[in-house]
Amino acid sequence: MRKLRIMVLMHQALMPPDSLEGVSDEEMMEWKTEFDVVQTLRYMGHDATPVGASDDLSKIRDAITELRPHICFNLLEEFHGVGLYDQHVVSYLELCKQHYTGCNPRGLMLSHDKYLAKKIMTYHRIPTPRFSVAVRGKRVRISGRLEYPLLVKSVVEDASLGITESSLVHDEAGLERQVAYVHDELRSDALVEEYIAGREFYVGVLGNQRLKVLPIWELKFTKAPKKPNIATAKVKWDAATQERLGVETDEANIPAELKERIESVCRRVYKALDLSGYARIDLRCNADGKVYVLEANPNPNLSFGEDFAESAEKGGVEYEELMKRIINLGLSYQAHWRTA
Ligand SMILES: Nc1ncnc2c1ncn2[C@@H]1O[C@H](COP(=O)(O)OP(=O)(O)O)[C@@H](O)[C@H]1O
Ligand SMILES: [Mg+2]
């Protein structure tokens, strides 16, 4: 691959140090992705410059002018502290006619709004748990078609923010309590879904037009197989909880027929939500083998050793090759300014 000037765009507070000397694991967790990506790009021979931004667009504009990057490696997930504004930053990059890695603004917008994404999936007959939305400030009126137990979550949050064991509700009182929690504490509309008991899968996808589906990954609670296997915030982020439940993710051992069905669903989700670059689709499969899409995550965590990179490696795409593919997808993405 030719040597490129790469601006690695990230949150200002996550600018990684140049070396790991004297850094604790806990400190490193914050900016491990940024560190891994910058170091790997440099190791590959690219001229990679970290650029931090959080609330000032001129920093991005100035970096583009000064560095004249061939591509912006986009690791920025919020602006003004607002997660949903990541799509606007990518729009800004497009307005600057700047190539970037990862998802386009439209794909980000469609998938970050889980209610909208589910409406689109339903239109395309992509299986997703039956759902209803409880709008903030309005009386809770949930479709009578929904059957308990239900899972209540924010329409816009990710990383399991606000998802605890109490998010699973078995009656109207529980439903009202959890909806109130999402409205008052998370300050967003609440998505109410039928709870799908069963196995949980994560599927990485790479591509713009032609898609590569990575090996299917499964979440397992090896020490608590009978517990509802909900990926709560603690399950995702708290080492002690992970240890207690024996939380593990690894390639799913599933029949070829189910694997093909999951892959096909993931491709359809990727297309339906206009995703590009790379994404991870979260799904569940019930005891009857029926597959349900929970959500799509554009620009998932790219840390070395995390699920996405691990499954890529299992699929024959090692970390450097993964970086290379993500960059090439960014360079070849046909943004409107290129075809106008
Ligand atoms: N309808 C559902 N049925 C079963 N589990 C669910 C459902 N919705 C969410 N979950 C559980 O909650 C976790 C987080 O939900 P998800 O929709 O993926 O949000 P996030 O964006 O926070 O990852 C899932 O990984 C899954 O374990
Ligand atoms: Mg998820």
Image: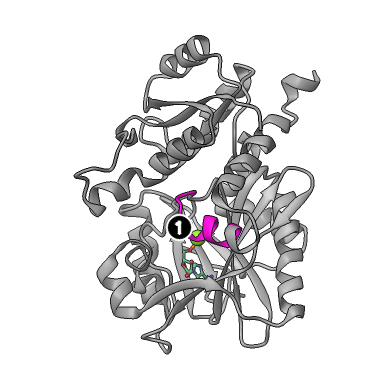
Vertical arrangement, residue 225 with respect to residue 207, above or below: below
| Location of residue 315 in the rendering, given as x and y in whole percent from the top left corner | 65, 62
Visual colour scheme:
one colour
Q: Which residue is drawn at 41% across and 17% down?
A: 59
Res. 77 image quadrant: top left
Q: Which corner quadrant holds the N terminus?
A: top right
Res. 126 visible in picture: no
For the view shown, which residue lies furthest in the left direction?
Answer: 22
Q: Is residue 150 left or right of residue 106?
A: left
Instruction: Identify the residue at horizontal 37%, vertical 24% (top origin).
Output: 55
Determine whether, in the image, residue 273 is placed left or right of residue 72.
right
Q: Which residues lie in the magenta part?
A: 302-312
Is 311 within the magenta? yes
Amino acid type, label 1: Gly
Q: Which residue is tagged 1?
A: 305
* Dot 1 crowding, Cα within 10 Å, few <14, some 14–19, many 20+: few
Q: Which of 295 and 75 is in front in this view?
A: 75
Work out whether 253 lies above or below 268: below
State the residue in front, 189 or 302. 302
Measuring from the top left, give residue 184's x and y in whole percent.
Answer: 32, 53
The residue under the point 34% across, 79% down is 245
| Mark 1 Cβ inside 8 Å of ligand 2 | no
Q: Is mark 1 on a helix, strand or loop?
A: loop
Query: Could one spot residue 335 in this view of the protein?
Result: yes
Q: Is residue 176 left or right of residue 333?
A: left
Q: Quadrant of the C terminus?
A: top right
Q: Residue 240 location, x and y as percent? A: 25, 70
Q: Is residue 66 above or below residue 51?
A: above
Image point (49%, 54%), residue name: 155
Rendered location of residue 140, percent (x, y) = 45, 62
Give whichever of 185, 121 is nearer the camera.
121
Residue 337 part of the magenta segment: no
